[in-house]
Amino acid sequence: MELGARSLRQRLRTDSEGRTVDVLVLAVLVALSTVLYVGDLGFYSDDWVFIGILHRTQDQSLLGLMEGLWSGDAVIRQRPVQILYLSGFYALFGLHPLPYHLANAIALLGAVLLLNAVLRELRQPRALALAVPALYAAMPNFSSDRFWIAAHQATLSVLFFLLGAWSAFRGQRVGRRNRRLGLQALAVVCFVLSALAYEVTMPLFALVAAVLVLQAKGNPVVLRRLFPLGALFAVAVVSLAAFKFGVSVRVSGEATPLDQLRMIAVGAPRINLGVYGVGLPYVLWWIASHALDVAVLAVAAVASVLVARAVGHAYTADVRATAPRHGVVGAATFVLGYAIFSSRPTSASRAPRWTTASGSGRRSEWPVRSWASWRGCSGRGSSRLWSGSSAAR
């Protein structure tokens, strides 16, 4: 008995130490991928539209600025969190762009750490729980979210979504009723905030619901515990859909839903599996030929070695066995991450910022990430992949 208790304490201590190491590795990775450029960023494109509206608003209080954005731009009305974010930062920092970009970098770090926490909560192998968010942090597919303030709401949306997913999964394991209900309420609030920041994560709510039901394994007690969450969730989804369709100006256009699906079916694989998949060597060659930067290469090399060693150290044989299942989940996440754009009269397959939601398993790279975590954990395959991804970023 004493031996078993000692073994349990040792395992818990090892898990805690591993979690700390993984958090530090991911934090360093995000910092390395940000530090070389964040100080040189400014305002671009649509940023100036919003800044102009805020500057011309007579009432410069926070509520006045929010009202100015609401009345001054029809598209942003469906994203109240973005209105609050832009108005709040303009009220605090005005025309100084650095705080906006630092806040976005912190939000990205939060999303990366939460993705790791979600995978751990789902009892995934440690190597996978580290490799997936590491690649998500370094992949260049949604790079515009990093430098375009008008797209920062996508990062916030993913941050809230992942916090909601973690709360929902953790709540299913908690025995105490009050704590479970609190976590379920937090999950619903975070999902609402995610959708009100950017609608791109809304189809992924279905994936969370499916995982929760599958985890219950038909147990009537567990299913009953899910009822409060399911009821709140259903009300929230219906309310969000009514609000979005009520204020959005992007639910109709010349392109039919079939046209939209066709553009996504062609464009999404072209961007994610073409340009940033099999075409990545060409992209890296083009960068090296036209904009070679020794500092970027050095940072990419350091990041690749750091993550490859960490994943290799965490690797266990069960990662390979679970790869097919992760491939299915990754494909589903990729499809759902693009699903919202089937209702929009624009080509969702071409804008890098829109891949933010097809990207935490997103961009069909959850299967790729699963592959990386078992194929190259000794350092060779994964090191090349991370190095290339970081350099392209």
Image (cartoon, rainbow, N blue to C red):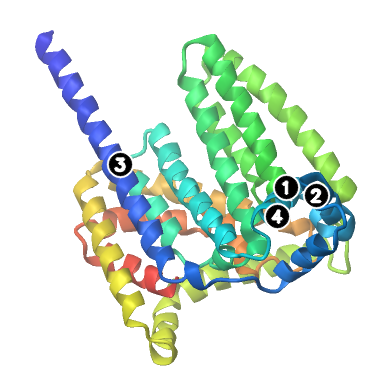
> At x 48% / y 69%, what residue is drawn?
39
Q: Mark 3: few, some, or many residues within 10 Å (few <14, many ≥20)?
A: many
Please report whichever mark, 2 or 3, sits nearer to the chain's N-terminal start: 2
The percent coordinates of residue 261 (x first, y second) are 72, 62
**Residue annotated with mark 3:** 126
Under mark 4, the amino acid is Leu
Q: Secondary structure at mark 2?
A: helix
Q: CA distance from mark 4 to mark 3?
A: 37 Å
Of the pair 45 and 306, the residue shown nearer to us: 45
Labels 1 and 4 touching (C-beta < 8 A) = yes
**Residue annotated with mark 4:** 86
Please report whichever mark, 4 or 2, sits nearer to the chain's N-terminal start: 2
Q: Quadrant of residue 325?
A: top left
Q: Quadrant of residue 53?
A: bottom right
Residue 283 got which mark?
none
Query: Is residue 185 visible to us here?
Result: yes
Q: Quadrant of the C terminus?
A: bottom left
> At x 53% / y 50%, what residue is drawn?
107
Q: Secondary structure at mark 1?
A: helix
Q: Secondary structure at mark 3?
A: helix
Q: CA distance from mark 1 to mark 3?
A: 37 Å
The percent coordinates of residue 128 (x first, y second) are 34, 47
Q: CA distance from mark 2 to mark 3?
A: 43 Å
Query: Is residue 77 visible to us here?
Result: no
Of the pair 221 and 160, the residue shown nearer to us: 160
Of the pair 212 and 153, the residue shown nearer to us: 153
